[in-house]
Image: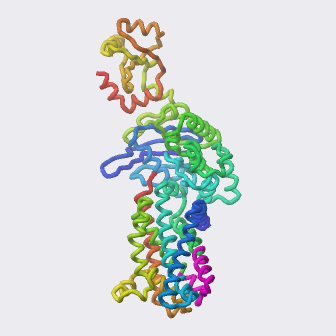
């Protein structure tokens, strides 16, 4: 559905995209992750034909990016870009007209999109009276009004409460079931973990890791991650070193990679003599993988 | 067909938004009526004219000088700035909407507002006995060209100079009010001293006012107002071209998510 090869973009001396390669299969949810400034928004701007790349190829359904491919893309940007004094129905009808839908198609699509995002009963409500979650759903409905083949969701749940977030996740799954291909950017790693079939991690303008969650786990050769709170961190680190447990810091938390599964009593026994305030085990999650890939060097430096 | 549908969509949207702000709509009706009443009464008393004749003379300048200036020029600036402030411009950039349709949509919406104000002004003038003396067609063309020029200027100001809603007032005050006075909108141009009258000949509002005034109040024909008329055509074309270039520049600078 989407194929990006050797994409490069620089603003003066500052290289934003550096030989970016990316492919998304039809009906796939692909998560594009990366720190701020990694090049996610620039990539979206180029996909939407708002920016020209310096070099490289982008094919959408086999066609290079142009005004024609705009019709195949639906974008729900980070902010809710809606006309606040128009009703939900009027917002959708306006964009349906812009995308060239006939009157009959407009009526059908407006109804369908409102139903799809769960706003059918708010069709006549002005957008400004809707809650933040509802406005985000309306923004997504606008992205869907012209039946795009590729939907780009740029941080779709940023700023939403947990309930609204679950609603958006459900909606994204439904869109995938309907056959849409989705490119999702997010800072919520749990969101990517739950929704995406494949994940690409963007750093300094290039994909530094890509694959399914299980494929990405190879970046952390550990059976589990042990999180420890102790008043004697130096002692714990020394003990872990002796045991051969690689050490990391995730934020302020002290963590060790366990090379094999250990029972809790065995772990406590291994740290005998170290005052443990709390101890927790968890599988290697996307946040650990992400930290390892984007800041691995720093995580290890801080361990020295 | 694509352009027509897009133009209609933009125009409809602007008019629906205006309709929602009923208070603004009411004020847009009150404004020209009040200006007409004031101009009409001043002319009647100072020039010893009958009310019918005074309102015939006051109606053209009230319409093209005051009403259309604020609704079409100020309104166009406000439309573009509001799009920028609520960031819906970005949404339009993503869509296949063409710049031509966007300009025409704003023009059509403000033409509808202009037609409404035209009807309102001449209804009030007719109520006190004023009549439209000249050719309706020629008058209509002058009004059309005035709206086109105002929307063009509004596009230039809105895309290039006004970043926020607060800027609209400052811009309209700085650019507009002196030009309105110099154009004979509030004080008849005949009252201006020679030095200002010479300056007024470079003021498009002066030509709009004089052209419509001579047609509507004195029954002048195209040959009688040719200098005003051709100036107005040239100005309208230049402003549409300027508006288009400004839009292209805005696209170049702001077309990002």
Q: Quadrant of the N terminus of chain B?
A: bottom right
Q: Inspect this view and state whether residue B82 appears.
A: yes
Residue A31 at what x, y percent from top left? Answer: 50, 37
Q: Nearer the viewer, residue B208 or A254?
A: B208
Vertical position of residue A132 compared to residue B240: above or below: above
Q: How many marks?
A: 0
Q: Residue at x 50, y 67 (%)?
A: B75
Residue B131: say if magenta: yes
Q: Residue at x 44, y 7 (%)?
A: A266
Vertical position of residue A19 compared to residue A64: above or below: above
Residue A300 at what x, y percent from top left? Answer: 33, 25
Q: Residue at x 54, y 54 (%)?
A: A70
Residue B186 is left or right of residue A99, and the answer is left
Q: Nearer the viewer, residue B55 or B142?
A: B55
Q: Nearer the viewer, residue B45 or B255?
A: B45
Residue B122: say if magenta: yes
Q: Inspect this view and state whether residue B2 appears.
A: no
Q: How is the image coloured?
A: rainbow
Residue B16 at what x, y percent from top left? Answer: 60, 61
Vertical position of residue B186 compared to residue A18: above or below: below
Task: Residue B15: name its quadrant.
Answer: bottom right
Task: Residue A36: name its quadrant.
Answer: top left
Vertical position of residue A218 compared to residue B2: above or below: above
The rendered magenta stretch, by its main secondary structure, is classed as: helix
Residue A7 at what x, y percent from top left? Answer: 42, 47
The magenta segment is B116-142
Specify the farthest residue to the left. Answer: A304
Task: Residue B128: name its quadrant.
Answer: bottom right
């Amino acid at each position: 559905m989407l194929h990006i090869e050797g994409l490069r973009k620089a603003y003066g001396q500052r290289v934003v995209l550096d030989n970016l390669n990316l492919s998304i299969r039809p009906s796939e949810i692909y998560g594009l992750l990366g720190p701020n400034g990694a090049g996610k928004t620039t990539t979206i701007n180029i996909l939407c034909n708002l920016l020209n790349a310096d070099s490289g190829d982008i094919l959408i359904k086999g066609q290079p990016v142009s005004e024609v491919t705009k019709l195949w893309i639906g974008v729900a940007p980070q902010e809710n870009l809606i006309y606040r004094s128009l009703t939900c129905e009027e917002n959708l009808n306006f964009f349906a007209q812009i995308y060239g839908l006939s009157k009959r198609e407009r009526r059908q699509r407006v109804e369908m999109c409102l139903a799809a995002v769960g706003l059918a009963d708010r069709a006549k409500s002005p957008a400004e009276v809707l809650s933040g979650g509802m406005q985000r759903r309306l923004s997504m409905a606008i992205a869907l009004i012209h039946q795009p083949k590729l939907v780009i969701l740029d941080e779709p749940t940023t700023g939403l409460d947990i309930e609204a977030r679950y609603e958006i996740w459900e909606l994204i799954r439904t869109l995938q079931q309907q056959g849409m291909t989705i490119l999702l950017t997010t800072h919520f790693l749990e969101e990517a973990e739950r929704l995406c079939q494949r994940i690409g991690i963007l750093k300094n303008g290039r994909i530094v890791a890509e694959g399914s969650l299980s494929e990405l786990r190879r970046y952390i050769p550990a059976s589990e991650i042990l999180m420890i709170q102790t008043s004697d961190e130096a002692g714990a680190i020394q003990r872990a070193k002796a045991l051969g447990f690689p050490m990391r810091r995730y934020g302020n938390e002290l963590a060790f990679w366990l090379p094999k599964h250990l029972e809790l009593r065995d772990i406590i026994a291994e740290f005998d003599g170290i005052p443990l305030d709390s101890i927790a085990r968890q599988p290697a999650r996307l946040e650990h993988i992400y930290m390892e890939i984007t800041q691995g060097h720093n995580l290890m430096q801080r361990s020295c | 067909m694509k352009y027509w549908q897009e133009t209609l969509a933009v125009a409809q949207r602007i008019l629906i938004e205006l309709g929602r702000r009923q208070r603004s709509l009411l004020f847009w009706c009150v404004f020209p009526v009040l200006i007409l009443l004031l101009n009409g009464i001043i002319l009647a008393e100072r020039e010893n004219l009958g009310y019918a004749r005074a309102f015939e003379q006051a109606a053209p300048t009230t319409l093209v000088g005051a009403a259309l200036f604020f609704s079409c020029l100020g309104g166009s600036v406000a439309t573009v700035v509001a799009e920028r402030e609520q960031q819906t411009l970005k949404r339009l950039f993503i869509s296949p909407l063409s710049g031509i349709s966007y300009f025409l949509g704003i023009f059509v919406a403000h033409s509808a507002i202009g037609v409404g104000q035209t009807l309102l002004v001449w209804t009030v003038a007719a109520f006190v006995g004023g009549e439209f003396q000249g050719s309706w067609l020629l008058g209509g063309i002058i009004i059309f060209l005035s709206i086109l020029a105002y929307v063009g200027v509004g596009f230039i100001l809105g895309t290039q100079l006004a970043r926020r809603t607060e800027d609209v007032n400052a811009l309209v005050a700085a650019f507009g009010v002196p030009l309105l006075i110099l154009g004979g909108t509030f004080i008849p141009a005949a009252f201006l001293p020679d030095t200002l009258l010479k300056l007024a000949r470079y003021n498009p509002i002066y030509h709009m006012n004089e052209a419509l005034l001579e047609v509507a109040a004195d029954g002048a024909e195209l040959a009688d107002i040719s200098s005003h008329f051709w100036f107005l055509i040239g100005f309208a074309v230049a402003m549409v071209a300027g508006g288009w270039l400004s839009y292209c520049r805005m696209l170049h600078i702001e077309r990002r998510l």
